[in-house]
Image (cartoon, rainbow, N blue to C red):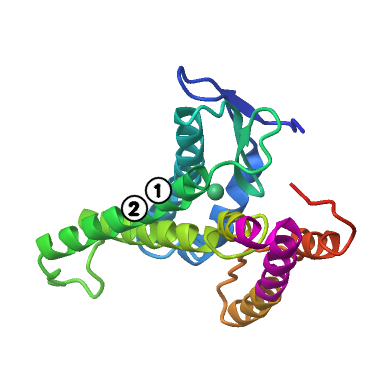
């Protein structure tokens, strides 16, 4: 699936990185309140946050990929596209060890915490702006850096948390399915995680409608499709989805 504008980056020691221009879509929609209307230093904050969010998704996938490589699971490539990111393992590894799955969201949670601490440190260091003769004080550089850090910090916390939701194809869904599979078998794992995923998908539509009404569109996974497929396939004979 190589579309126009796809770039492939090769860095020694890492799997090939393939990025599709569609990777810009979600960060651009998420930062809509920043760049819309071109107010104050907001567009500059967006200019930092949009590439920062793409790098955050890349950090998530590198977390999966580097952990997989260290555990002896070769990684074919890392893909960044409209659907977010994916680290594609080589061969037929249907259920990789949970440590590989945990690594992605944990990278985002750790990054988010570090960025929010940096924002707090900047906030403490900067004195309250003196408006002086201006009605609106000119934007201070620390204001710009601090806002970008806050956006990226919360963005990473959200990325980590959303990826841990118990639904397919998210990391949290695979982790829960792994745990259920070991205790009660693959069919029960597909049934339960598929069902949770459908409930969460319905909730994400409610959240989308509410956020559109509030003027800040917020689209969150999971999709209905993979969870419906998992739930349905669990009822068909002894076959299990990968
Ligand atoms: Zn992941």
Asked whether 40 or 113 is in front, the reply is: 113
Asked if residue 120 is among those painted magenta in the image, a careful observer would answer no
Q: In the image, what residue occupies the spot 71% across and 76% down?
A: 202
User: Label 2 CB, ligand 1: below 8 Å?
Assistant: no
Above or below, comparing residue 34 to residue 55 in the picture: below
Horizontal and vertical percent for residue 193? 67, 65
Q: Locate residue 185 relative to residue 134 in the image: left or right.
A: right
Q: Quadrant of residue 233?
A: bottom right
Q: Locate residue 145 relative to residue 185 in the image: left or right.
A: left
Horizontal and vertical percent for residue 143? 25, 60
Q: Which residue is mark 2?
A: 110
- Crowding around mark 1 (Cα neighbors within 10 Å: few <14, some 14 to 19, many 20+) is many
Magenta stretch: helix, strand or loop mostly: helix
Q: Secondary structure at mark 2?
A: helix
Q: Which residue is mark 1?
A: 107
Above or below, comparing residue 14 to residue 228 in the picture: above
Asked whether 26 or 46 is in front, the reply is: 26
Q: Quadrant of residue 184?
A: bottom right
Horizontal and vertical percent for residue 239? 84, 51
Above or below, comparing residue 128 to residue 126 in the picture: below
Q: In the image, what residue occupies the spot 65% across and 28% down?
A: 90
Q: How many marks?
A: 2
Asked if residue 191 is among those painted magenta in the image, a careful observer would answer yes
Asked whether 47 or 170 is in front, the reply is: 170
Q: Secondary structure at mark 1?
A: helix
Horizontal and vertical percent for residue 201? 69, 71
Contact, mark 1 vs mark 2 (Cβ under 8 Å): yes
Residue extent of the magenta highlight: 180-200
Q: Is residue 140 visible in the rendered structure shown here?
A: no
Query: What is the distance, in whole Å, between disc 1 and disc 2 at their CAs?
Result: 5 Å
């Amino acid at each position: 699936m190589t579309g126009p504008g796809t770039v492939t980056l090769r860095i020694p020691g890492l799997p090939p990185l393939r990025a599709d221009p569609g990777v810009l879509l979600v960060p651009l929609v998420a930062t809509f309140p920043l760049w819309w209307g071109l107010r104050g230093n907001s567009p500059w904050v967006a200019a930092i946050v949009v590439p920062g969010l793409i790098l955050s998704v890349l950090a998530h996938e590198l977390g999966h990929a580097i952990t997989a490589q260290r555990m002896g699971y070769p990684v074919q490539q890392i893909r960044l596209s409209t659907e977010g990111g994916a680290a594609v393992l080589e061969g037929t590894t249907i259920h990789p060890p949970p440590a590989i799955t945990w690594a992605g969201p944990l990278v985002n949670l750790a990054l988010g915490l570090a960025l929010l601490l940096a924002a707090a440190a900047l906030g403490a260091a900067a004195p309250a702006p003196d408006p002086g003769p201006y009605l609106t004080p000119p934007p201070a550089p620390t204001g710009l850096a601090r806002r970008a850090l806050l956006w990226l910090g919360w963005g990473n916390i959200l990325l980590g948390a959303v990826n841990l939701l118990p639904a397919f194809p998210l990391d949290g869904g695979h982790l829960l399915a792994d745990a259920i599979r070991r205790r009660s078998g693959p069919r029960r794992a597909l049934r339960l995680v598929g069902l949770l995923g459908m409930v969460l998908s319905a909730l994400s539509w409610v959240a989308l409608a509410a956020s559109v009404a509030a003027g800040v569109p917020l689209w969150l996974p999971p999709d209905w499709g993979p969870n419906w497929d998992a739930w349905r396939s669990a009822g068909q004979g002894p076959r299990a989805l990968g």
